[in-house]
């Protein structure tokens, strides 16, 4: 049984210094995002972002078929995969047919979602994650803790120790410049000598049959333009109707993600290089099910910028691994319950409902509303809450119990309420002094309410 | 199968996003482009008619200038310092990432304010094309910005006279 979010978060919070450091690192990125989105047309861009995604979802089948037709016409093989297992089998079959032993993979949350790396490893195919942050967590045997910044929870001294073991950097070396230089040599070697490249996609364009990939490191380009086989693994919700929509996406994506005006590399590829093979695997894995739910459909609009993670007070203080789902943070907390509500029942509660995630979302997903809607769906409320619900619904009983409680609670030593069993009074939290009368009584007494 | 699921979801039609036009207020696109390019770790210059490309590269890169890969860009975007490069103009698609020093040459009169105008200039028959904005970079180690991740370590843009 994987630990719940509060249990896992407690582990992360056991080191307050690290939690503070993590909090500050993400707030730094949030501040950069604020400066980068300081455009007169920012709110209009968010409207356009929301509209283009809603449009694409309303014509999803048609646009995917248009993409497939155009991509196939220019020599790309398009595959459809209903779930993670089918996706993994399709990718493995392409690789084995081509005799591939080494794969250079660039960032793709979809392949994380599908568990592609362990599946290929079991088939005897070596996968090197070529984004520097992804390589750090891969070497450490961890999943990414953030969808854009996979190793945001790693300190440079720890990266130094890891690279010392795996890349032979000098012991104690912790300068980001020196470590990134070692990573460059290590990863360029993997990228230039791979038998196949796997990338994700930030968008598919129906009008061009094109795949759009954005990186800052250049790793996706080095891989896909060097290897004889290129496989794009992508969720069906990444489709956009037109290049006009791509213009909007490219204006909001990097600004929201890292506070950059655009990523260093933005690639639009519609055909393989002559003499090489290119495949696109379109993956459903629960997406059409979400599409069928008017309440939760708009979660499919997510462009995976990570802005809601960076701004979330819970994510910043509890770390990405505490969510126990491939996509952490507020967006993960509304995606995970539809995958397995029982396993992820704590996630809709990993929020203060402050609303910041919704405010920064560049495609205006109403994350707070969906968090609330998922809370209402978490099954089997404890009997205590059912009783409390009845009490709160009955004003006479509520006032009677309130009057009784205000008298009794003051007579009881506070330690009774403290203690391990009460999450509200753990060390560092104190119960406020119990008032002598209720607000309603006060209003009656002072003549404010007849 | 998947298409059946999509049909069953019966999502009501939502109109396409209304086309946005630039509200970029900059009167001097070249000035804005050069400033943004510098902020993303690149460098650019407007080449005068009497300046040779080689001499300019030497002044930028010193002895390393002979190792630079020079590729043509079709147009540039003032708001983000990006240059559009099409694979049709290159010997190999890896040209843009393999070299340590990348130099992009763009006609100075081919600047657009924002991505809204830029995507409309992408060639319809393109097999592969890029928006390149500054050199390769990473901030994956403690958010410290390191220029020169897996791709080019330096990126220079020459805005050529008409």
Image (cartoon, coloured by chain):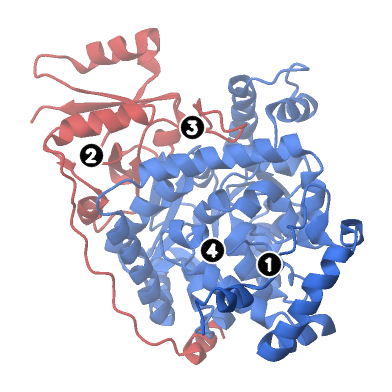
Instruction: Kindly tell me whether residue A102 is visible in this rendering.
Output: no
The chain holding disc 1 is: A
Query: Do callouts 2 and 4 point to residues on the same chain?
Result: no
Image mark for residue B137: 3
Q: Quadrant of residue A123?
A: bottom right
Among the two numbered marks 2 and 3 on one chain, the one whose residue lies closer to the N terminus? 2
Q: Rounded to the nearest whole Å, what is the CA distance between mark 2 and mark 1?
A: 43 Å
Q: Rounded to the nearest whole Å, what is the CA distance between mark 2 and mark 4?
A: 31 Å
Horizontal side of A335 relative to A302 (left or right) equals: right
Is residue A243 positioned above or below A274 on the image? below
The picture places residue B88, in percent across and down from the top left corner, at: 29, 45
Determine contact: label 2, label 1, CB under 8 Å.
no
Chain A representation colour: blue
Q: Rounded to the nearest whole Å, what is the CA distance between mark 3 and mark 1?
A: 37 Å
Among the two numbered marks 1 and 4 on one chain, the one whose residue lies closer to the N terminus? 4
Q: Residues within 10 Å of mark 3 (few under 14, many from 20)?
A: many
Is residue A335 positioned above or below B40 on the image? below
Determine contact: label 2, label 4, CB under 8 Å.
no
Is residue A364 positioned above or below A178 on the image? below
The residue pinned by badge 4 equals A234
Image mark for residue B78: 2
Q: Residue at x 30, y 56 (%)?
A: A247
Query: Do callouts 1 and 4 point to residues on the same chain?
Result: yes
The local secondary structure at tag 1 comes to helix
Q: Residues within 10 Å of mark 2 (few under 14, many from 20)?
A: many
Chain B representation colour: red
The residue pinned by badge 1 equals A349
The chain holding disc 2 is: B
């Amino acid at each position: 049984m994987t630990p719940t979010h509060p249990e896992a978060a407690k582990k992360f919070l056991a080191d307050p210094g690290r939690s503070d450091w993590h909090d500050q690192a993400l707030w730094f990125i949030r501040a950069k995002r604020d400066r980068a989105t300081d455009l007169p047309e920012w709110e209009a861009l968010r409207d356009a972002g929301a509209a283009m995604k809603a449009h694409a979802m309303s014509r999803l089948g048609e646009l995917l078929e248009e993409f497939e037709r155009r991509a196939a016409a220019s020599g790309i093989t398009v595959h459809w995969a209903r779930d993670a297992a089918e996706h993994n089998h399709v990718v493995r079959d392409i690789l084995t047919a081509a005799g591939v032993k080494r794969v250079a993979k660039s960032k793709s949350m979809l392949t994380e979602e599908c568990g592609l790396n362990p599946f290929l490893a079991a088939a005897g195919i070596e996968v090197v994650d070529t984004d520097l942050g992804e390589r750090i967590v891969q070497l450490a045997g961890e999943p990414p803790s953030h969808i854009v910044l996979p190793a945001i929870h790693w300190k440079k001294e720890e990266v130094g120790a890891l690279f010392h073991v795996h890349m032979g950097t000098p012991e104690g070396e912790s300068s980001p410049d020196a470590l990134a230089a070692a990573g460059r040599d290590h990863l360029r070697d993997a990228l230039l000598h791979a038998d196949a490249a796997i990338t994700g996609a930030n968008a598919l364009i129906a009008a061009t049959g094109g795949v759009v990939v954005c990186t800052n490191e250049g790793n996706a380009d080095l891989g896909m333009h060097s290897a004889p086989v290129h496989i794009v693994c992508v969720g069906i919700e990444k489709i956009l109707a037109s290049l006009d929509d791509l213009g909007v996406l490219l204006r909001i994506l990097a600004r929201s993600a890292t506070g950059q005006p655009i990523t260093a590399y933005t690639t639009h590829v519609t055909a393989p290089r002559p003499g090489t093979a290119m495949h696109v695997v379109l993956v459903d894995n629960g997406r059409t099910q979400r599409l069928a739910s008017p309440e939760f459909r708009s979660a499919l609009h997510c462009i995976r910028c990570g802005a809601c993670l960076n701004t979330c007070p819970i994510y910043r203080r509890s770390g990405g691994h505490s969510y126990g789902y491939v996509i952490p943070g507020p967006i993960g907390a509304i995606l995970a319950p539809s995958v397995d509500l029982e396993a992820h029942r704590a996630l809709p509660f990993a929020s203060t409902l402050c609303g910041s995630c919704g405010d920064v979302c560049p495609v205006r997903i109403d994350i707070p509303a969906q968090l609330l809607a998922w809370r209402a769906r978490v099954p089997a409320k404890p009997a205590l809450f059912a009783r409390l619900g009845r009490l709160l619904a009955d004003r006479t009983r509520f006032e009677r119990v309130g009057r009784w409680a205000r008298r009794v609670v003051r007579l009881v030593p506070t330690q009774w309420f403290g203690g391990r069993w009460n999450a509200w009074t753990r060390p560092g939290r104190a119960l406020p002094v119990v008032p002598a009368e209720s607000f309603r009584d006060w209003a009656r007494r002072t003549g404010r309410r007849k | 199968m998947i298409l059946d699921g999509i049909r069953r979801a019966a999502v009501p039609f939502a109109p396409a996003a209304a086309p946005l036009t630039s509200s970029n207020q900059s009167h001097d696109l070249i000035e804005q482009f050069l400033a943004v390019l510098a902020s993303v770790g690149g460098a650019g210059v407007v080449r005068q008619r009497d300046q040779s490309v080689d001499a300019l590269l030497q002044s930028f890169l010193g002895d390393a200038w002979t190792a630079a890969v020079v590729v043509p860009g079709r147009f540039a975007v003032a708001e983000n310092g990006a240059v559009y490069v099409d694979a049709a103009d290159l010997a190999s698609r890896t040209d843009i990432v393999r070299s340590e020093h990348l130099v992009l040459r763009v006609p100075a009169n081919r600047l657009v304010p924002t991505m809204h105008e830029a995507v409309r200039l992408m060639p319809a028959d393109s097999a592969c094309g890029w928006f390149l904005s500054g050199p390769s970079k990473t901030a994956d180690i403690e958010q410290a910005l390191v220029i020169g991740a897996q791709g080019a370590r330096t990126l220079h843009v020459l805005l050529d006279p008409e």
